Amino acid sequence: MYRKSLIAAAILIALAVPATAGGLTVWTFDSVPSDANVSTGTLIPLIGTGTAFRGPGVGAPNPPETFYSGYPNSGPDTNNSRWGVTPLAGATSPFETSAPALSRYVQFSTSTVGFGILKIDYVHYFSNTAVNTATVQYTTDGSTFVNLDTYTVSQESSTWYHKSYDLTAIPGVLNNANFAFRIAADFDPSVAKYKAARGASSVGTSGAWGFDNVIVPEPGSLFVLGAGIAGLFGTIRRRR
């Protein structure tokens, strides 16, 4: 029920948080209105304003975006999409080293003007042959990116991972119209080259990442988000 609760809570936030109090940007990648087709999602935020795009080399120049089944629900949801991106390693052999580390990425940009706190939250899907290491980066000037965190996964089957970061204490990220963050493919730190998420697999051009439920909230939004989700779960429990 996570996804349905999230979307409903986001709508509550949009109604409850004044524009002057900061804001919230939510990318669910689902078609609006619903078309009952997971492959026809959108990069337009469900709530708020912002842009999401692939960096150079991630897909052919300006192809249609690709969408697949999103972060799982407890029940069927034929409009639940994730944004799929590939390739993340090199596009030519040897795939493990033919693209520089951090050169393949997705980027999310949204203004933080009016924010007194800043968090980012998302779920990240790795296919078995996808690059196993991601570095999260942020910018305060729109062009120079600083590393925030690096994570490496090891899995036996394609898996989702939830990531959340509090950037509030970082100088320059608040009240900034140029704020953006990236999730970039990185070399596995143990071998200084790209490795696959599944140890028995090899990276290749079909190895894919996916993203869903990307949220950039400010304090009033966080409070209403928590209250909205708590209320929704209470309603769900009463109906059982």
Image (tube, rainbow, N blue to C red):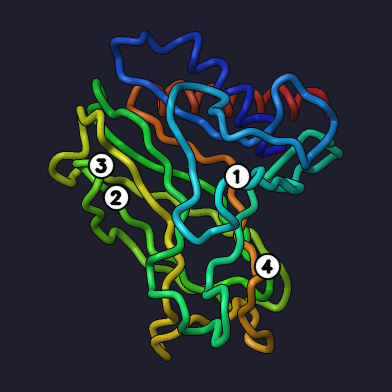
Q: Which residue is mark 3?
A: 142
Q: CA distance from mark 4 to mark 2?
A: 25 Å
Number of marks drawn = 4
User: Residue 111 appears at what percent x and percent y?
Assistant: 31, 28
- For disc 1, the neighbor class at 10 Å (few under 14, some 14 to 19, many from 20) is many
Choose the circle earlier in sequence order: 4 or 1: 4
The circle drawn on residue 138 is: 2
Q: CA distance from mark 4 to mark 3?
A: 30 Å
- Disc number lying in front (3 or 1): 3
- Disc number lying in front (4 or 3): 3
Image quarter of the N terminus: top right
- For disc 2, the neighbor class at 10 Å (few under 14, some 14 to 19, many from 20) is many
Disc 4, SS: loop
Q: Nearer the viewer, residue 228 or 155?
A: 155
Disc 3, SS: loop
**Residue 175 left/right relative to 209:** left
User: Residue 171 appears at what percent x and percent y?
Assistant: 13, 43
Choose the circle earlier in sequence order: 4 or 3: 4
Going by the numbered disc 2, the residue's amino acid type is Tyr
Q: Are marks 4 and 2 in contact (CB under 8 Å)?
A: no
**Residue 156 left/right relative to 113:** right
Q: Are marks 3 and 1 in contact (CB under 8 Å)?
A: no
Determine the residue positioned at 71% across, 28% down. 31
Q: Which residue is mark 1?
A: 212
